[in-house]
């Protein structure tokens, strides 16, 4: 009878451990997903930071082209 009780307790402990591990895995996954999202955001921000000067450059080029062409056509 004692052995049965110990066995039951052991099983319950195992189940408890598994549940804990499952929870930890879930938390770990969520953490990873959050990290990936953050990295994704950082990548986007980096891209935007790279594109901004380019866009400005292109804009000023266009302005120059437009200004020059209108000046010449007059």
Image (spheres, rainbow, N blue to C red):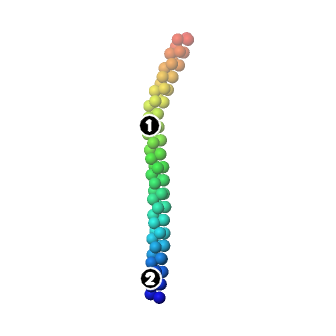
Name the one closer to the observer, 64 or 20: 20
In percent of width and height, residue 32 lies at 46, 54
Q: Residues within 10 Å of mark 2 (few under 14, many from 20)?
A: few
Q: Residue 49: give its label.
A: 1
Instruction: Say what secondary structure mark 2 lies in.
Output: helix
The numbered mark, 1 or 2, whose residue comes first in the sequence reads: 2
Name the one closer to the observer, 30 or 6: 6
In percent of width and height, residue 27 lies at 47, 61
Height in image: 3 above or below 15?
Answer: below
Q: Residue at x 47, y 76 (%)?
A: 11
Q: Quadrant of residue 6?
A: bottom left
Q: Residue at x 48, y 26 (%)?
A: 58
Name the one closer to the observer, 50 or 11: 11
Q: Residue at x 48, y 73 (%)?
A: 15
Q: Residue 5: give its label.
A: none
Height in image: 26 above or below 39?
Answer: below
In percent of width and height, residue 3 lies at 45, 85
Q: Residues within 10 Å of mark 1 (few under 14, many from 20)?
A: few
Furthest-right residue in this view:
73
Height in image: 25 above or below 13?
Answer: above
Q: Residue at x 44, y 39 (%)?
A: 46
Q: Are marks 1 and 2 in contact (CB under 8 Å)?
A: no
Q: CA distance from mark 1 to mark 2?
A: 63 Å
Screen quadrant of the C terminus: top right
Instruction: Say what secondary structure mark 1 lies in.
Output: helix
Name the residue tied to disc 2: 6
Name the one closer to the observer, 23 or 55: 23
């Amino acid at each position: 009878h004692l052995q049965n009780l110990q066995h039951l307790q052991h099983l319950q402990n195992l189940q408890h451990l598994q549940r804990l591990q499952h929870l930890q895995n879930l938390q770990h996954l969520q953490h990873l997903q959050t990290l990936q999202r953050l990295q994704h955001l950082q990548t986007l921000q980096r891209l935007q930071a790279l594109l901004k000067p380019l866009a400005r450059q292109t804009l000023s080029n266009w302005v120059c082209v437009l200004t020059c062409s209108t000046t010449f056509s007059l």
